[in-house]
Image: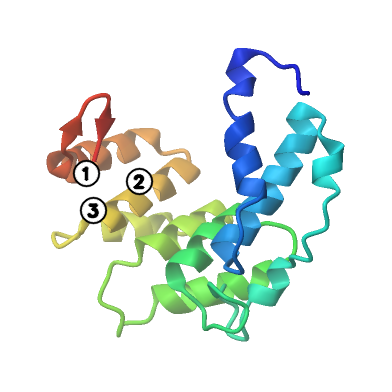
């Protein structure tokens, strides 16, 4: 039995579900590892935290520095950006930075590379000018706008993130109160 208040207790079922989700994908294993740490920290469920899953994030980092969805796969730019932004233990941060810079300056990729900019901003790299340049693009899709707004937030530019959110994201949002899609 776990005794907790309602505010904190609302997360217990979700964390427990994450802990026991199956699969071999990094987007299944890594959240389970974080859920284990949070259960130990906030709910004193040390027995759950000590559960050895055999998961090592370094098994998912590829030779080019990116993170793959599966340990035998090739690197994925979105997965690499999202996990790299957290700069977790178990990955070579310098290699992921190198991978993200390669993605950022690769002119053969069609998108604005907002995901790479977000991760680099989260890793405290000097990318503000690159974010400013990308934010001026006319052909920005919603995904890039979300990543760029997150990058602004990482750099402490909440007003610019809010402007970008209002101009590029809210104009395409559908209202399903109390949610937006």
Instruction: Say which residue label 3 marks.
Output: 142
Marks 1 and 2, how far apart at CA? 10 Å
Q: Position of residue 152 (x, y in %)?
A: 40, 45
Q: Earlier in the sequence, mark 1 or mark 2?
A: 2
Rendered image: mark on residue 149: 2
- Residue occupying the point 49% across, 63% down: 81
Query: Contact (CB < 8 A) between labels 3 and 1?
Result: yes
Q: Quadrant of the N terminus?
A: top right
Query: Contact (CB < 8 A) between labels 3 and 2?
Result: no
Closer to viewer: mark 1 or mark 2: 1
Label 1 crowd (10 A; few <14 / some 14-19 / many >=20)? some
Q: Nearer the viewer, residue 166 or 13?
A: 13
Query: Contact (CB < 8 A) between labels 1 and 2?
Result: yes
Label 2 crowd (10 A; few <14 / some 14-19 / many >=20)? many
Left or right: residue 24 compared with residue 153: right
Rendered image: mark on residue 169: 1
Q: Nearer the viewer, residue 59 or 132?
A: 59
């Amino acid at each position: 039995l776990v005794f907790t208040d309602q505010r904190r207790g609302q997360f217990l079922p979700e964390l427990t579900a994450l802990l026991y989700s199956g699969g071999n994908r990094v987007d299944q294993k890594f959240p389970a590892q974080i859920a284990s740490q949070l259960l130990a920290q906030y709910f004193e469920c040390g027995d759950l935290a000590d559960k050895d899953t055999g998961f090592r994030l370094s098994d998912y980092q590829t030779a080019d520095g990116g993170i793959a969805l599966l340990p035998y796969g090739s690197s994925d730019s979105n997965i690499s950006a999202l996990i790299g932004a957290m700069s977790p233990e178990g990955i070579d941060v310098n290699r992921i930075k190198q991978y993200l810079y390669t993605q950022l300056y690769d002119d053969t990729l069609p998108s604005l590379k907002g995901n790479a900019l977000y991760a680099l901003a989260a890793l405290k790299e000097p990318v503000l000018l690159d974010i400013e340049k990308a934010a001026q693009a006319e052909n920005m899709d919603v995904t890039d706008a979300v990543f760029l707004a997150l990058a602004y937030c990482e750099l402490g530019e909440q007003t610019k993130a809010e402007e970008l959110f209002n101009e590029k994201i809210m104009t395409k949002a559908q209202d399903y109160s109390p949610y937006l899609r």
